[in-house]
Each structure stands twice: as C-alpha cells, then as structure tokens.
Image (cartoon, coloured by chain):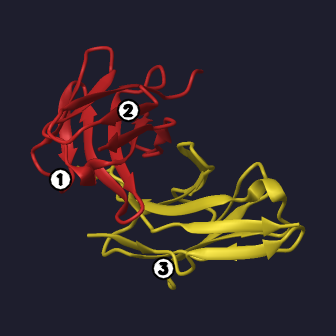
Chain colours: A yellow, B red
Amino acid sequence: AQSVTQLDSQVPVFEEAPVELRCNYSSSVSVYLFWYVQYPNQGLQLLLKYLSGSTLVESINGFEAEFNKSQTSFHLRKPSVHISDTAEYFCAVSVPHSGSARQLTFGSGTQLTVLP
Amino acid sequence: KAGVTQTPRYLIKTRGQQVTLSCSPISGHRSVSWYQQTPGQGLQFLFEYFSETQRNKGNFPGRFSGRQFSNSRSEMNVSTLELGDSALYLCASSPTSSTSNTQYFGPGTRLTVL
C-alpha cells in the first residue's frame, strides 16, 4: 500500500517570499505523483504531475516540484508567492499500470496562507 | 471542453434517509472516481467506474454504492445516512490512456446530515 505524508499542516508566508511545501511518500513500487490545490468551497485543481522523464516539473502559474526517488519526496516550491496562492495544497500518488491505477492516495494537506 | 460537473452542489438530509449524487465527466472520459473529503479523515477514495463496471473500491461500508451509465455519467448513493457521512463528495474523471492516470475533479457536493 502507498502512503503520503505532508509534513506541515499550516504554512504562513509573506507575499513575494519563497515557499516550499513538503511531501514524502512511501511505496514499494513506482508511482505517479501529483499536486492538487483546493480553494475554499471548491473542488481540487490539478497543479502539476510527475509521470516520468525529467524530475523537475513546472506549472503555468510559477510552481515547480522535484521528484527525488532516493528521498521519496516530491516537494512543491514557488520562488515568490502572491495573495491569490492562499489555498490548501494536496500531494497525491497513484500506482500506474495496476488495477488501482486511478485510485489516488492523498496526503493530509497543507494550508498555505500568504500574508500581506 | 467543459469540466466535471456535479449536482447538486449542496444537500441537507436527516439521519436514516438516503441520498443520490450525480457526476458528469469531461467529454470523452470513461473513468469516473468518487472521493469523500472530511476534516477528520481527509480525502478518501470511494470507488471507480469504467464502462459501467466498478473497477476498484475503497474501504467504505456497503451503504455507499454507485453506478455508471452508458454515457459515462455516474451516480453515487448513500443509504441510511449517518451523521458521520457529512462531507464534501468529489467526483473525478480520467482519460483512459494507459500513459496517464491524471484525474480531473468536479466542484463537489457538500452533504450535511442532521
């Protein structure tokens, strides 16, 4: 079975400062990795994903995440945050090429609050 | 393309009642999954449907059931509602390409059980 740990439940940061949201996973097989963002009273929006290839993946709104197989991590970073980035962020994994390929296992979430 | 749609957005029920939630996937997506989100348990997988067949099921009691229609629309049903069933229920659809397990979520249905 897979598990995901998001080490920080709350991350406050000032506007225009850099931020890193940490995600570690546990799995005995290869996984796909995802970051989703949830704004208040909304569903989950896909932020970025790692399926294979380059270990550094980027989103269109300035976030990036790096897959580190040896450390089983997939931390999310942004060099300069905006007030509008305030939201809850979820890290998730799935196991490709399996009967449960479309079953996401989520971390507990990290509430990012950007302060003016 | 239109995104995943879920109806209704909000529901209030009382204990013992049953409820049916609906989900329309992104056009062309044939896989639909359901998740429950609560403050205490977080996001938990309920089940996945593909081509009208349940392909995978999470660890939930039999009161939780679902189905999928030939147009890929899906419904989930919860019978004999309990207070603990109060949650945001999220539906996600996925393309069936073997190279991508990416799931796209709807806005959710907020169920309150009184």
Are discs 2 and 1 located on one and the same chain?
Answer: yes
- Label 3 and label 1 in one chain: no
Q: Secondary structure at mark 1?
A: loop
Disc 2 marks a residue whose amino acid type is Leu
Q: Which residue is mark 3?
A: A72
The answer to whether residue A39 is left or right of residue A7 is right
* Three-letter code, disc 1: Phe
Mark-to-mark CA distance, 2 and 1: 20 Å
Residue farthest toward the left in the current orientation of the protein: B62
The location of residue B98, given as percent across then percent down, is: 38, 42
The residue at which mark 1 appears reads as: B60
Looking at the rendering, which quadrant does residue A21 occupy?
A: bottom right
Name the subunit of mark 2: B
Secondary element at image label 3: loop
Nearer to us in this view, B80 or B91: B80
Q: Quadrant of the N terminus of chain A?
A: bottom left
How many neighbours does mark 2 have within 10 angstroms: few (below 14), some (14-19), or many (20 or more)? some
Q: Secondary structure at mark 2?
A: strand
Residue marked by disc 2:
B11
Percent x, y of residue A111: 61, 67
Residue A63 in view in this figure: yes
Front: mark 3 or 2: 2
Please report, as a chain letter, where disc 1 is located: B
**Mark-to-mark CA distance, 3 and 1:** 29 Å
From mark 3 to mark 2, how far is it between C-alphas?
A: 40 Å
Identify residue type, mark 3. Answer: Thr
The quarter of the picture where residue A65 lies is bottom right
Name the spot of residue A12 as percent of width and height, x first: 73, 75
Q: Chain of mark 3?
A: A
